[in-house]
Image: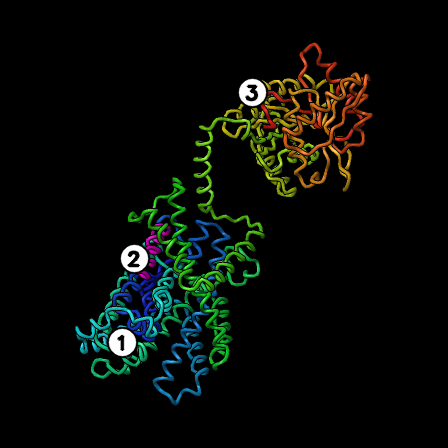
Amino acid sequence: MENTADSKTVKFGTFAGVFTPSILTIFGVIMFMRANFVTGDAGIINALIILALAQFITFLTTFSVGAISTNMQVEGGGAYYMVSRVLGAEFGGAIGIALFMAQVISITFYLLGFTEAITVAFPSTANYFMYIGLAAAIILFAIARVGADWAIKTQYVIMAVLFTSIFIYLAGAGQHFSMETFKLNLNALDPAKGGTPFWSLFAIYFPSVTGFIAGINMSGDLEDPGKNMLRGTIYSLLVASSVYGLQILLYGGAFPREELILHPFEVMEKNALFGAGFMVIAGVCAATLSSALGRFVGAPRVLQAIARDEILPFLKPFAKGKGKNNEPVNGLYFCIIATIIMLCIGGNGEGGKFLNSVAGIMGMFFLYTFGLLNLAAFVELYTANPSYRPRFKHFHWSLALLGTILSFGSAILIDYKYAIAAFAVLCFLIWYLRRRDMRNSFGDARRGYLYTRIRKALLALQDFHDDDRNWRPSILILSGDPNKRNSLVTYADRLNGGKGMVTLANVLKGNIGELHTKREEAIKQLLDYLSENNIKAFPHVVIGDTLQDGVRTLLRGTAYTPVRPNILACGWTAASEKLNDYLAFLREATMLNINQVIIHDGGNSIPEKGKRIDLWWRGHENGPLMMLLAHLLMHSNEYSDSRLYVKRVVRNNEDIKDAENELKQLIDEARMEAEIEVVESEASFAETLHKHSSEACCIFLGFELPDNENKDKWQESYKKMLSGMPTTILVHSVVPRNYLW
């Protein structure tokens, strides 16, 4: 332990902060009460396989912890902190809450194990079962309440008793070792004689190795978290593997299978070295109490870290610590209250079945925690962020991926019902946290993961031929301040149909040196608008000396990527003084092969029923793109129950039949549902339009750009068409495509 001169804050090193709480939690009740049962039932070979597999998962997880923790400054919260900073607040919050509850409940089970050992050793105390458990809980709470430094000192004493007990019972087994017995116990018990399935035995044994998480939970109290957690965890796992391996070999070779199965604890007590069975009892008491104390110290720190990150507002009271070491006192009070309640439920013989069911689910949370830690390390390496430079070099992505698969796979093989139940709880927590629309991402690796995938996808997309069949709309909207052009943005977004990409663009006129701060404000304005209106789009703000310069920058700067805009959407302008600039950027878009959509806001409201879309077919130049955009519009929520009418004007009655057949063939090839209407009229198109489409909700028209000599005439003709009409979408297709493929 180190007591710094400046802050007087106690910090722990590898041995005190990680190895001690880890090894004392690993050497828990399973070692005394169930390990020999597994050896007898599974046989020595399968027991060693179970141990090797369990420890292999923990070693893989430890390597992942080492890769993550040596690549960042780890603060309090242990596994929660690392998962949240890599996979995001939702995953971290879900696993943190689940892990905290698992540790709180495990306190009760360690205390029940302690109390059971006491009542077995001293039968006269059986009537005081619950009171013994409550007394032990209060004493451990008092030790933890004084502070982590006193808890560690207490664990030193417990560790001395525990290691002495281990030596006593291992040496006692060694005195009775026989190669004949060893050979008889080598293989598994015949299933016909009541043998337990392999994965059921693994489920019994695996909790013995999960205790290393206790040392990781101390991350906020360590001198050098990355180095301390890695070394302390590896040392504890090596020691634990050696002890558990020796126990399997010695007891498997010393005592008959039936005795190991029926009396797994008694065989240790009765055959202790020098007849010191009391030391075995002292050992199981020390193991259970040390495990419970480790949870009392570690669990509140996880809760404090979650509360400090403000993931859930109602956890805020648990964020504040007390004293020079910022002890999580409020979380500790929660732990003791929950423990007392559960002891009252399960400590008097009632409610045990309920607690066992909960314990089964909670055990899965440890496996899911290990799985997510491995997944986090895999994501960190896969993203290849430049910031990923861990000091721990003995790590490969395949190890993390294997750890992920083994952790999640083991959960399913152990008990798929509990695995599904625990998975459902985690999914609910993730869903709930996502619904809160949290802004805190902690700079997690998800962005790097997505960036890597997008980069690879874009490079691959660049090599694909841009085929008509795979065409998707990518719309650049000249929105300016979108609050003033809501109809433009809304309709342009509807034309996307959720199939392509939409970008809202604003041009600030002026000097970049003067407007760079306003540009940030304009971007925020666009983001706020998109969020408030639930529009999935990207913001883009440029600065130009004039509006035309800014639009030119937008068009040229985005025209050469695989997902470049292929539609420019803007509002209609009737102002003569703006016509030159207006046509200039439309022509610029044409030269860059970007289609144009001009949206004229008719100010009409959309009725709930009887919605009608009129599309005036005037040729194949703009018609196919209009048809596709009308189809996409009909997939928006507002127009989902609308009817599309494809209309065409003919001058003579003789042409009606041919026009109808042509439109029918067109609609059939387009595989669209639409009504056909051929209008015979010799009046101007503006008059025909007003007569036959004034009751529509939305109108589609094609247009061509005029030359300079006819631009005023062009503007006037469209002003007449649009005057007093419903919202009209003018479409200019510049790329010869079969959009109705």
Give the secondary structure at mark 3: loop
* Amino acid at pointer 3: Leu
Give the secondary structure at mark 2: helix
* Callouts 2 and 1 close, C-beta under 8 Å: no
Locate the C terminus and report the quarter of the image it occupies. Answer: top right
Q: In this view, does 380 lie above or below 173?
A: above
Please tell me whether the stretch drawn in magenta is mainly helix, strand or loop. Answer: helix
Residue at 48% over, 53% down: 91
Residue 644 located within the stretch drawn in magenta: no
**Residue 178 percent location from the top left of the image:** 17, 75
Locate the N terminus and report the quarter of the image it occupies. Answer: bottom left
* Amino acid at pointer 1: Arg
Give the magenta part as a residue range.
Answer: 53-69
Which residue, given by chain and number where applicable, does mark 3 sit on?
A: 592
Which badge, 2 or 3, comes first in the chain's sequence?
Answer: 2
In the displayed orientation, state which residue is furthest to the top.
709
**Residue 179 percent location from the top left of the image:** 17, 73
Which badge, 1 or 3, comes first in the chain's sequence?
Answer: 1
The image quadrant that residue 542 belongs to is top right
Which residue, given by chain and number where applicable, does mark 1 sit on?
A: 257
Disc number for residue 231: 2
Give the secondary structure at mark 1: helix
* Amino acid at pointer 2: Arg
Disc 2: CA contacts within 10 A as few (<14), some (14-19) or many (>=20): some
Q: Is residue 710 visible?
A: yes
Q: Which of marks 1 and 3 is in front?
A: 1
